[in-house]
Image (cartoon, helix red, strand yellow):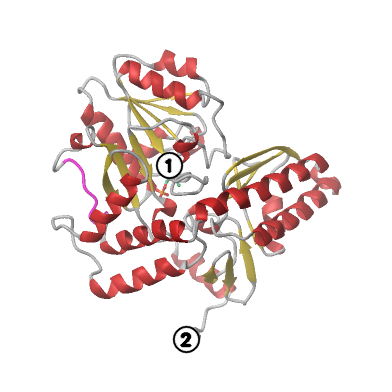
Amino acid sequence: MATVKHLSSSETVELFRRYVIPNYTRYPINLVRGEGAFVWDSEGNRYLDLFPGWGCNLLGHCPAPVVQAVQEQVALLIHVPNSWHMEAQGRWAQMLCERSFDAQAFFCNSGTEANEAAIKLARLHTPPERYKIITFTGGFHGRTLGSTAATAQPKYHEGLGPLMAGFVYAPFGDLDAVARRIDDETAAIMIEPIQGEGGIRIPPEGFLQGLRRLADEHNLLLIFDEVQAGCGRTGHWFAYQHFGVTPDVMTLAKSLCGGIAGGAMLARRDIAPSLRRGMHAATFGGNPIAARAGIAALEMIENEHLLENVARVSGVFRERLETLQSQCDLIREVRVLGLMIGVELTVEGAPAVQACMERRLLINCTQGNVIRLLPPMNLTVEQAEEGCDILGEVLTQMAHSPSTS
Ligand SMILES: *Cc1c(COP(=O)(O)O)cnc(C)c1O
């Protein structure tokens, strides 16, 4: 590999300070290379990354089959519009439908776009007077204005009003509350089967099945946003497969293409045509590079038996974190489904994230006090142990330091 001369982290920070809109909170570190569960900064420091790409790098950094597929494709055909057929998009759609339900796919470039497609489909599929979509507190569906309105968290709405009309919020996990919100204008129920950004919230027993029942009784579309939970993350291809409930519409992105940008909406075959010709589009949606990367990601998961590895590594996290909980009173609850891992603290989580980073471990905190890990599916047991060791040290030290309580 050719050696690249990188800017230092502080030089890079200075560029951002001058030229990049500061709408993100960024760590003052310039990441330059990644491989598997590790990333390196321009100073040569190596980090164990248990939150790679905010969940996008589900196969680790630069997974070889994805790299190869993209390298091959980029020299053949980079982009052609959706006014043509392209083999890779068709094969990719087939592979996704074969692993989920009897559906057809629409492709786009991100999670929020996939959800916009689902929102449009719900409105187009039902009569005009039915336009309302029930979504859930603590949910997260993206940052475009439709998805922002669908996201039932006031902090994301501040200053943006008036929001798109038609979203009705219900408490996550409360079936009776959902039933009470259904009326003649309701078109759909939209939910993350496991809330990610909301703090790794796993629905109570029977809740998703109850939503399926309500949707059937009232002829509503059941839309699952699996942008974070899907594509193998939980140890099944899709999170809904843990619950014995099948949605009518499912949205995917983040890890869908092994780290390349890509999104998809799958809709039941009899519903899909409601997204009528001409009513929706994404210029780059399903482009050959994303499609080849998406296919390579699915093949890699199968060839390397990664769904099985999720169960193994998830068990290590669960055991280690539950043991830690019994020893450390900063931990209120440990929530694990596959490689969606939440550790709810009794205190703010940001200092823990900072302390882990100083020990070269990258993690995330969401909702102020939930440590969130979204490790890659090809993490080894040893790497999981190493991450738990560091997190354990950090939380134990915080519990004993007088400033934390
Ligand atoms: C990240 C996320 C989105 C938004 O995806 P983008 O690609 O950032 O638009 C939507 N839904 C869920 C559940 C997510 O986790």
Q: Does the residue labelled 1 lie within 8 Å of ligand 1?
A: yes
* 242 to the left or right of 134: right
Counting residues from the start of the chain, the first of labels 2 and 1 encountered is 2
Image quadrant where residue 181 sits: top left
| Total numbered badges shown on the rendered structure | 2
Q: Position of residue 47 (x, y in %)?
A: 63, 66
Q: Mark 2 points at which residue?
A: 2
**Residue at 76% across / 54% down in the picture?**
394
* 285 to the left or right of 136: left
Residue type, mark 2 in image: Ala
339 or 395: nearer the eye? 339
Image quadrant where residue 100 sits: top left
Which dot marks residue 269?
A: none
User: Quick one: SS at disc 2?
Assistant: loop
Query: In the image, is residue 280 part of the stretch drawn in magenta?
Result: yes
Q: Where 332 sits versus 177, above or below? A: below
* Real-space CA distance between mark 2 and mark 1, rounded to the nearest whole angstrom: 38 Å
Q: Name the residue under label 1.
A: 226
Q: Where is residue 368 in the image (x, y as percent from the top left)?
A: 63, 42
Q: Label 2: how many residues lie within 10 Å, few (<14), some (14-19) or many (20+)?
A: few
Q: Which of marks 2 and 1 is in front?
A: 1
User: Quick one: SS at disc 1?
Assistant: loop
Residue type, mark 1 in image: Glu
Name the main secondary structure of what is drawn in magenta: loop
Q: Where 46 sits versus 237, above or below? A: below
Q: Label 1: how many residues lie within 10 Å, few (<14), some (14-19) or many (20+)?
A: many
109 or 405: nearer the eye? 109
Query: In the image, is residue 291 part of the stretch drawn in magenta?
Result: no
Q: Does the residue labelled 2 lie within 8 Å of ligand 1?
A: no
1 or 358: nearer the eye? 1
Q: Where 357 sits versus 105, above or below? A: below
Q: What stretch is highlighted in magenta?
A: 279-285
